[in-house]
């Protein structure tokens, strides 16, 4: 097979088609991963916040481990079924890499905060990291709601360094509502009601 060199315009057109193909390839309920992780994090945050405030017992912070357990389980059982012959594009790999790095970073720092004497402003760090992942996803896919909502979470994150510890979970929950749940519902609506 003969190799063909692409000029700059053809290269950009190819990249545009790859992005558009990835966007068009989204199946029904494409926002499901955003919704799974958004709702699991929101509900776990409210559970931890409520139990710690009610009891004054910091050991309830171990409930944060529900996020990877429930999120991972629900992601596995609600994932899109593999279709025969589906092609993974460069954009698919980039998005997978963005979330792999963000997820591993968040997991590692969370474990450090939970199981070592090192004190980190972990809710700030997680919201900032996940906001960056969401904003990057929105920019890569040219899905403005995710880019804007991820940016909103990034802007909200420093507020957790300012407010009293008792109110940090409220900002954290608001951040996940903004950056995961809202774009997830918008994405689901758009994938389930394509423009004619």
Image: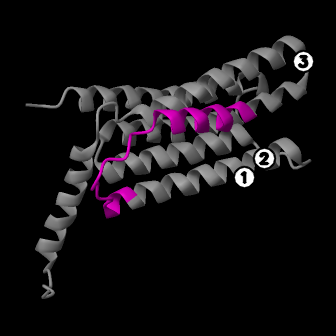
* C-alpha gap between disc 1 and disc 3: 26 Å
- In the picture, the quarter occupied by the N terminus is bottom left
Task: Please give the residue where the numbered disc 3 appears in the rendered image.
Answer: 56
Residue closest to the eye, 108 or 151: 108
Tell me the magenta residue range: 65-92
In this view, 110 is above or below 176: below
Write down the quadrant of residue 71 in the picture.
top right
In this view, 133 is above or below 146: below
Where is residue 103? Give x, y as percent.
Answer: 60, 49
Outermost residue to the bottom: 2
Q: What SS does tag 3 mark?
A: loop
Residue at 74% in and 32% down = 64
Give the mark nearest the N terminus, 2 or 3: 3
Cβ atoms under marks 2 and 1 closer than 8 Å: yes
Cβ atoms under marks 2 and 3 closer than 8 Å: no
Task: Please give the residue where the numbered disc 2 appears in the rendered image.
Answer: 111
Q: Does the magenta portion include 82?
A: yes
Task: Please give the residue where the numbered disc 1 appears in the rendered image.
Answer: 108
Residue closest to the eye, 93 or 175: 93
Q: What SS does tag 2 mark?
A: helix
* C-alpha gap between disc 2 and disc 1: 5 Å
Q: Does the magenta portion include 75?
A: yes
């Amino acid at each position: 097979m003969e190799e063909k060199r692409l000029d700059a315009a053809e290269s950009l057109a190819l990249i545009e088609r790859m992005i558009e193909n990835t966007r068009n390839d989204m199946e029904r309920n494409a926002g499901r991963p955003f919704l799974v992780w958004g709702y699991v994090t929101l509900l776990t945050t409210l559970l931890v916040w409520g139990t710690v405030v009610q009891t004054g017992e910091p050991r309830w912070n171990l409930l944060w481990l529900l996020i990877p357990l429930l999120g991972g389980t629900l992601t596995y059982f609600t994932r899109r079924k593999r279709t025969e012959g589906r092609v993974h594009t460069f954009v698919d790999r980039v998005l997978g890499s963005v979330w792999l790095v963000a997820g591993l970073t968040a997991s590692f720092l969370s474990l450090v905060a939970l199981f070592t004497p090192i004190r980190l402003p972990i809710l700030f760090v997680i919201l900032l990291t996940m906001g960056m992942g969401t904003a990057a996803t929105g920019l890569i896919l040219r899905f403005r709601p995710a880019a804007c909502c991820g940016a909103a979470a990034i802007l909200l994150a420093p507020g957790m360094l300012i407010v009293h510890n008792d109110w940090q979970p409220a900002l954290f929950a608001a951040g996940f509502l903004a950056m995961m749940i809202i774009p997830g519902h918008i994405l689901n609506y758009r994938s389930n009601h394509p423009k004619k």
